[in-house]
Image: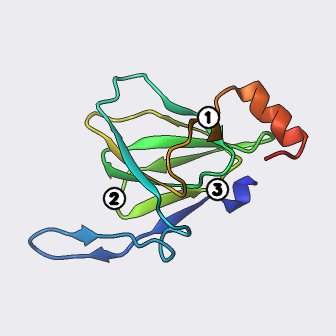
Amino acid sequence: MTLEEVRIIELPKIMDARGNLSFVEQMNHIPFEIKRTYWIYDVPGGEARGGHAFRQNKEFIIALSGSFDVVVDDGDRQQTFQLNRSYYGLYIPNGLWRSIENFSTNSLALEFGSINYDGNDYIRDYDDFLKLKRDGQI
């Protein structure tokens, strides 16, 4: 996969004086069937999350509260996406290295995955990731 496939997707935003509402639908806003949902919160200042790639799992990430940066790496180039609005999500296909950094106070990251949790799907060593990319295995 390449960085060109990573994209910010604007989600519906229904504005109301009582408060706004946004939503996501699988195979509509999120370009895959959702198999897993999880969230990241209470990240201490200066910490980063992620730091891995997936062999098969695709992700969609939303900053429900606060802000953070998602750094995506295809083995040749890196691109940073700042998420700071709850009506934007970031689609990341499989086969790309990602890390989440610069969490603001009280930030909340909501993540959707295309497969159920599988520890064997993770590539946790960057050098292994680069080798798999070079060999065309991801």
| Dot 3 and dot 1 residues touching (CB under 8 Å) | no
* Residue matched to label 3: 93
Q: Which residue is farthest left?
A: 18
* Side (left or right) of 67 relative to 8: left
- Residue where numbered disc 2 is placed: 86
Does residue 25 lie above or below 8 as drawn?
below
Q: Is 110 on the left or on the right of 90, as rendered?
A: left
Q: CA distance from mark 3 to mark 1?
A: 13 Å
Q: As drawn, which residue projects farthest toward the right? A: 135
Q: Is residue 68 above or below residue 45?
A: below
Give the labeled residue for mark 1: 52
Mark 3 or mark 2, earlier in chain? 2
Q: Which mark is residue 40?
A: none
Q: Can you say whether 31 is above or below 35 in the image? A: below
What residue do we see at 47% from left, 58% from top? 35
Q: Earlier in the sequence, mark 2 or mark 1?
A: 1
Question: Quick one: label 3 or label 1, which is nearer the N terminus?
Answer: 1
Q: Nearer the viewer, residue 64 or 80?
A: 64
Residue type at tag 1: His
In the image, which is nearer the foreground, mark 3 or mark 2?
A: 3
Residue 8 image position (x, y, % from top left): 53, 62
Choose mark 2 or mark 1, whichever is in front: 1
Residue at image coords 50%, 51% = 116
Residue sitting nearer the eye, 80 or 93 = 93
